[in-house]
Image (cartoon, rainbow, N blue to C red):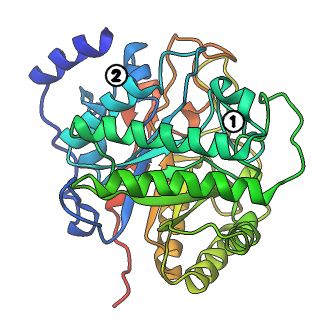
Amino acid sequence: MIRLALAAVLLAATALTACAQTPDVSTASPSGGIPRFYFGADLSYVNEMEDCGAVYRVDGQPTDAFELFSDVGTNLVRVRLWNDAKWTPYSDLTDVKETIRRSRAAGMQVLLNFHYSDDWADGDHQSVPAEWLAIKNDVPALSQALYDYTLATLRELDAEGLMPEMVQVGNETNVELMAQDTRESPMPPFNWTRNAALLNAGIRAVRDAGAESAIKPRIMLHVAQPENVEPWFEKAEEYGVTGYDLIGISFYHKWSTMDLDGLQGVVGRVVQAYPDRDVIVVETAYPFTLEGADEAGNLLGEPLLPGYPATPDGQMKFLTDLTQMTIDAGGVGVVTWEPAWVSTGCKTRWATGSNWENATHFDWTRGNELIPSGRWAQQDYRWPE
């Protein structure tokens, strides 16, 4: 694979010299416990991008992507897992293991994101894995299947020394978990009794796996867009969803009715309402340009937030302001989504290239050189006394 050839090049490449010293507050090794603040990056695409020929550079020098992110302050790597995505060889358990190994080698912790689907699960789509379609409406059987799969996956990771420090039970579960036959199927009415049973099965599986491991993963539930967070978690409490540690929020201005002030308000209220849980903005991103490198249309672009132009400085201001607001509101982390999904000659299901290259931390006009906003985690933040 191209990635293997790149590794040989990297051994002889000049060491990364331009990165500022990472602050202690953003440093966390796998054995280092809970950091003061999670500076995270979803790097699920990196293995695929490197196989497609992507090279990540700092000062013109090819650099291992995971080492690069660690050097610029990242202490948490998020990685997605699909059950059986036959349309891609990536984001399966083999690929996830490689991502975890590379993250650990670079001294970063890991957040494993169970989608519980063979395809993208998000705030509008939650399709059941094909293997479980026949039991989709049998709540006890489906709950048991979800429990068994989650437990077996984590046990396998643990046996190889790859137990993640954090686990998401579902991705952007605004709508009912595994409620559709396929992504194209209509979404049935929300059945919170069913949803709570499935979520609790996943939570219980993570707890049981952690009981057997030296690493006890923290458990996250995750909702897209801040305006949906408070009513969703109120329902979760009402229907007896319990045993989780973290509340994850996606924030993309393009798909949210709120601005940064609105996000900060939600984070602050949720921190107060659930004092025994931590709050993380676990997905966010902002464009550094409205241009594109390929035929794949950019998912992020206009409308932009006032005061935040689509420039490297505007992207940096967005990320640093969002992070400071999260800190001020009592949140414990920010994770950028796919900052390394650069443009390559490979095809997705939609087009050749990347739909996200204008929201990464790399400039394709300079051979995927790290841009200044890639160092958002190393900025000076105000911390509570």
**Hey, which quadrant is residue 121 in on the image?**
top right
Q: Which mark is residue 238?
A: none
Residue placed most toward the observer, 70 or 320? 70
What residue is at 66 percent from the left and 79 percent from the top? 265
Residue at image point 76% right, 59% down? 193
Q: Residues within 10 Å of mark 1 (few under 14, many from 20)?
A: some
Residue at x-position 70% and y-position 26%: 297
Can you tell which quarter of the image residue 97 is in? top left
Question: Looking at the picture, does residue 229 appear above or below residue 86?
Answer: below
How far across and how far down the image is residue 66, in percent? Answer: 28, 37
**Rendered view: 384 above or below 116:** below
Q: Name the residue under label 1.
A: 299
Res 178 → quadrant: top right
Q: Please provide percent x and percent y for residue 17.
A: 15, 42
Quadrant, the N terminus: top left
- Residue 202: x and y, percent? 53, 51
Q: Is residue 313 positioned above or below 345 on the image?
A: below
Q: In this view, does 138 lie above or below 241?
A: above
Residue, disc 2: 55
Q: Does the rendering let one see residue 348?
A: yes
Q: Earlier in the sequence, mark 2 or mark 1?
A: 2
Mark 2 vs mark 1, CA separation in Å:
22 Å
Tags 2 and 1 in contact by the CB under 8 Å rule?
no
Task: Name the side, left or right, on which 90 lies relative to 130.
Answer: left
Left or right of residue 164: residue 294: right
Q: Quadrant of the C terminus?
A: bottom left
Amino acid beneath label 1? Leu
Residue at 63%, 58% in the rendered image: 308
